[in-house]
Image (cartoon, rainbow, N blue to C red):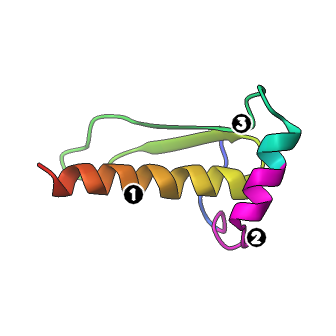
Amino acid sequence: MIKKLEGLFSRRDFSKKDLRRVISKNKGKALCYVLITCRESEDDGSMDVDMKYDGERWLAAYLIKSAQNVIEDGLDNE
């Protein structure tokens, strides 16, 4: 099930309170996953990128934003 990124972040404004509520309600269960894959770039520089996720859209958005921060922080420390 491939879902488009368009509108992913704008559908719901989530808070830490929302996140804590969902986690405590589903303790020990996988709440959400995000899988982003890509293929080698073409000669023109374009790249085919796919994203799959399962779970709440706002939680998938939270995971993506958090992962981006981790990656950017790692780049800053290199």
List the residue tagged with mark 2.
12
**Mark positioned earlier in the residue sequence (2 or 3):** 3
Q: Amino acid at mark 3?
A: Met
Q: What residue is at 71 percent from the left and 58 percent from the top?
A: 58
Q: Is residue 19 left or right of residue 40?
A: right
The magenta segment = 7-21
Q: What residue is at 28 percent from the left and 35 percent from the top?
A: 40
List the residue tagged with mark 1.
69
Q: Is residue 40 left or right of residue 6?
A: left
Q: Which mark is residue 1?
A: 3
Residue 28 drawn at (x, y percent) = 77, 26
Q: Amino acid at mark 1?
A: Asn
Residue 73 appearing in the image: yes
For the residues carrying marks 2 and 3, which lies nearer the camera in this image?
2
Q: Is residue 25 left or right of residue 68?
A: right
Category of crowding for the residue at label 1, using alpha-carbon neighbours closer than 10 angstroms: few (below 14), some (14–19), many (at least 20): few
